[in-house]
Image (cartoon, rainbow, N blue to C red):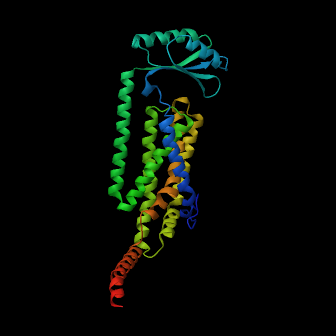
Amino acid sequence: MRLIRLFPDDSAFRFVRWRVVSFPFSAFVSVMTVVLFATVGLNFGIDFTGGTLMEMQAKNGQADLAQVRQAAHGFEVGEVEVQEFGQGGQVSIRFRVQPGGEAAQSKLVSNARATFEKDYEIRRVETVGPRVSGELVQAGTLGVVLSIVMVLAYLWFRFELNLAIGAVIGTLHDIVLTVGFFLITREEFNMTSIAAILTIVGYSLNETVVVFDRTRELLRKYKNLPTEELLDLSINHTMSRTVMTATTTALSLLALVLFGGQAIQGFANVMLYGVLICTYSAIFVSSPMLIYLGVKTSARAAADAKADAAAREAAANAPATRGTA
């Protein structure tokens, strides 16, 4: 029985030459991410900002946002965010933390229920205090930073210096572009988003390690092969596995996006985007980066060292030759 191949085993596609497109594209998106992060900022969820979130479903199937917004502002509780999401008249209302503490938040929820329950079905009410949200911010930030540090330490010991730096660049690239997804789409950034980022870091690490393991094997096997050809060969050798992994993971996430419901849709959206970014990064960013990090076969490195030594010797003898003449 012949196995199904999503990518030919004997392929010889020149992936590395596309770095002239992938590098400027990744650089542009990364710069835009930094600019948007500094100017616009993330759409932090109630986990981080504190306050009350209420999600409702219009009983007649159509939500009147103007009426909901007018009624919400009529509570005179400060800034209120009213948004329509999903399909079929779903509305979310976000109230900021009230100065009266828990009692004020409870009173606000009671007033909102009494106002909207006639025309809307209250499906979710979530209240987070400022102290809890501050602790979540600290814990989430610390968790992300420590996990990234541990991943980078693993890469540093897993590979030689040049390969480790390439893997680190690829992982950081995927993190930056994932944050860019939150900035561009205005997807709510909450504790689930942190879980998605950590999962994407692991997936990115897995994709990069597979390709770089093959690169390291080929460095020992082909002593005189040009660096670009060797990198293309390593990508082509692992491409069947990469396509299979990305396809099966993306199909699973697509099912969650379409049928998983509102509770996990945000996580599934980010993960689906992350799978695409990690696959693109392992092929068109991390591997071509090794060219500029000086990865060479042993024979070519020895030849380059010999050429450099000959050039230095010739430069040292040049003044003596001119003096004798």
> Residue 128: x and y, percent?
42, 21
Q: Is residue 116 above or below residue 149?
A: above
- Taking depth in this image into account, of 20 and 154 the one nearest to the observer is 20
Q: Position of residue 159 (x, y in %)?
A: 36, 60
* Residue 123 or residue 37, whichever sits in front: 37
* Quadrant including the C terminus: bottom left
297 lies above or below 254:
below
In the current view of this chain or complex, which residue is farthest to the bottom? 325
Q: Is residue 23 left or right of residue 316?
A: right
Residue in the picture at 43% in, 37% down? 195
Q: Can residue 324 be seen in this snapshot? A: yes
Q: Please tell me which residue is depicted at 44% across the width and 64% down the height of the picture.
A: 215
Q: Is residue 245 visible?
A: no
Q: Quadrant of the N terminus?
A: bottom right
- Left or right side of 83 for 290: left
Number of numbered callouts drawn: 0
The image shows residue 126 at horizontal and vertical percentages of 47, 20
Q: Is residue 318 above or below residue 230?
A: below
Which percent across, then down, holds residue 72? 56, 14
Asked if 132 appears above or below 246 in the picture, the reply is: above
Q: Name which quarter of the figure residue 13 lies in.
A: bottom right
